[in-house]
């Protein structure tokens, strides 16, 4: 189920996550991505939106992304601008740095 093959990430459990946002016309858009965390699911979902036919409705840094983990059922929200800040910020470990580099490449 994990979309990337990496020895660093192989021990991290992944979950099927739904990433969604509501566009300026009030239409909700949702994609599913495999991810181990909120900060991994959000950019993977945003990348799917930006590459899709709905990219013209994506409003940018103020967009509120909702990440829902299917099992166990949980939901989180993060503004795209805050996500970009986290991706551009420093890392606490080499593992986190590798994750940020990989995720920045998706956007």
Image (spheres, helix red, strand yellow):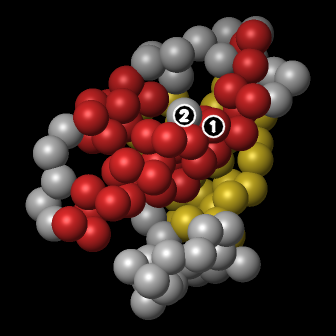
Give 56 or 29, whichever is nearer the viewer. 56
> Relative to residue 36, is residue 34 drawn left or right?
right
Residue plotted at (44% across, 18% down) = 61
Asked if residue 54 shows in the view, the reply is yes
- In the picture, residue 1 is in which quadrant? bottom right
Rendered view: 65 above or below 41: above
> Relative to residue 74, is residue 2 drawn left or right?
right
Rendered view: 18 above or below 36: above
Rendered view: 39 above or below 54: below
**SS at badge 1:** helix
Residue indicated by mark 2: 107
- The image position of residue 103, as x and y in percent, is 47, 48
Asked if residue 28 shows in the view, the reply is no
Rendered view: 1 above or below 90: below
Residue plotted at (38% across, 59% down) = 99
**SS at badge 2:** loop
- The image position of residue 45, as x and y in percent, is 63, 44
**Among numbered discs 1 and 2, the one appearing first in the sequence:** 1
- In the picture, residue 82 is in which quadrant? top left
Give 104 or 1, whichever is nearer the viewer. 104
Residue indicated by mark 1: 47
Give 97 or 80, whichever is nearer the viewer. 97
* Cα distance in 3D space between marks 1 and 2: 5 Å
Asked if labels 2 and 1 touch by Cβ distance under 8 angstroms, the answer is yes
Give 30 or 93, whichever is nearer the viewer. 93
Total numbered badges shown on the rendered structure: 2
Disc on res. 74: none
Residue plotted at (54% across, 34% down) = 107
Farthest residue to the bottom: give it. Answer: 11
- The image position of residue 49, as x and y in percent, is 71, 32
- The image position of residue 96, as x and y in percent, is 27, 62
Mark 2: few/some/many CA within 10 Å (<14, 14-19, 20+): some
């Amino acid at each position: 189920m994990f979309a990337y093959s990496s020895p660093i990430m192989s021990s991290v459990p992944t979950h099927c996550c739904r990433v969604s946002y509501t566009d300026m016309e009030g239409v909700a858009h949702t994609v599913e991505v495999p991810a181990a965390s909120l900060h991994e699911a959000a950019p993977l979902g945003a990348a799917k939106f930006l590459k899709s036919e709905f990219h013209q409705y994506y409003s940018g840094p103020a967009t509120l992304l909702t990440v829902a983990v299917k099992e166990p059922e949980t939901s989180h929200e993060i503004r795209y601008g805050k996500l970009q800040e986290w991706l551009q910020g420093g890392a606490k470990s080499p593992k986190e740095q590798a994750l940020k580099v990989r995720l920045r490449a998706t956007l």
